[in-house]
Amino acid sequence: MSRNPRGFADCSWLREAFLDVPREHFVPDKVWWPAPGEDGRYPLIDRAEKPWAWLKAAYRPGAALITQIDDGAVSATGPAKGAFTSSISSPGVIVELIRHLDPEPGDSILEIGTGTGYTTALLVCRSGSAKVITVEIDAGLAARARACLRALGMDPHVVTGDGERGHADGAPYDRILSTASVRQVPAAWLRQLRPGGVLVAPLDSPFGCDLMVRFVGDGRGRAVGIPVAQVEFMRVRSQRVPRSYEELGWPAQVNSMPWTGLRIAADATGQRVTAGAALGGACGWQGRV
Ligand SMILES: C[S@@+](CC[C@H](N)C(=O)[O-])C[C@H]1O[C@@H](n2cnc3c(N)ncnc32)[C@H](O)[C@@H]1O
């Protein structure tokens, strides 16, 4: 649930980008549907066998399609069990992420978690290939995304590496977007954000979901943010192991409070979540933290 779900409202460039970029171009021919069947396994949707079902699934507004299970240990030959490790994010969630990222034309953008490259393509529509850098930890996924983007005439810098380190070569960035969730905001992202730059990232929370948080950085390694939506994302690889919420800066019994009123401050020493900060406008996010 989003704090201010508005679809494409006030974001006509994003609507245009959705119309311009063919999502199906980025969807692998075989993907898993994210809800298990009666046998507990995730059904495979094979384009060759069911082209219409595959296409409909690709455009379902609320559906992420699973493109990798168990870091690639499971091959896409049939229904499968295991942990989701890559996907093409759902259209609805991508709209929310990018709407809150709110990039201006020509902004320098760092994306973490390239996946299929579909979100990257939408960012390229706004900023141009030369201004977008995307980091994917899985070399095979990075290569496939690079090829898909090039086939559409897009040539952002697709880096194979650990996105938790950001990408210092292109810093500082106007915008940083993570499409993998974190338990703790990596210090590199905060350091690599320009003063007033925006970071949007899904953050693990004690609410039984991730919170999509929109941070504004001070350019000196500190950022303050508010949650703007409840989402579910795959974790960045090195933060898969659970940690205590207390250690991660969450106050006790926070889940008896409304998630919409939280404020998250993060720097190299860690993060602190406090309650009672009504920082967003009633009609959508307008201001700076
Ligand atoms: C939810 S998927 C991204 C989907 C992408 N937005 C799309 O629509 O195609 C998350 C991705 O983050 C990647 N990932 C996980 N940990 C990472 C890390 N430390 N650095 C870079 N990428 C990482 C995963 O391999 C996966 O491809």
Image (tube, rainbow, N blue to C red):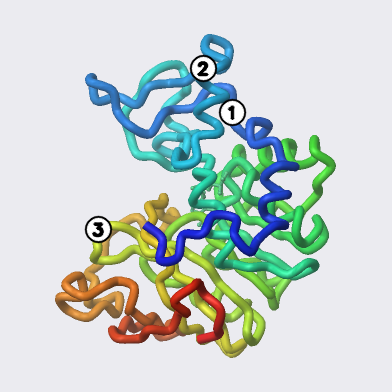
Q: Earlier in the sequence, mark 1 or mark 2?
A: 1
Q: CA distance from mark 2 to mark 3?
A: 32 Å
**Mark 3, residues whose alpha carbon is within 10 Å: few (<14), some, or many (≥20)?**
few
Which residue is depicted at the point 26% across and 77% down? 250
The answer to whether any part of residue 182 appears in the image is no
Q: Which residue is mark 2?
A: 46
Q: Establish if 47 lies above or below 202.
A: above
Q: Establish if 93 lies above or below 227.
A: above
Does the beta carbon at disc 1 come under 8 Å from ligand 1? no
Of the residues shown, which amino acid type is indicated by label 2? Asp
> Residue 204: which disc?
none
Q: Which residue is mark 3?
A: 208
Looking at this view, is 125 or 68 the one in front?
125
Residue 181: x and y, percent?
A: 43, 59
Does the beta carbon at disc 2 come under 8 Å from ligand 1? no
Image-based side of 256 in relation to 123, left or right: left
Which residue is depicted at the point 33% across and 79% down? 262
Q: Considering the numbered disc 2 on the image, is that residue within a helix, a strand or a loop?
A: strand
Q: Which residue is mark 1?
A: 28
Q: Considering the numbered disc 3 on the image, is that residue within a helix, a strand or a loop?
A: loop
Residue 165: x and y, percent?
A: 56, 67
Q: Nearer the viewer, mark 3 or mark 1?
A: 3
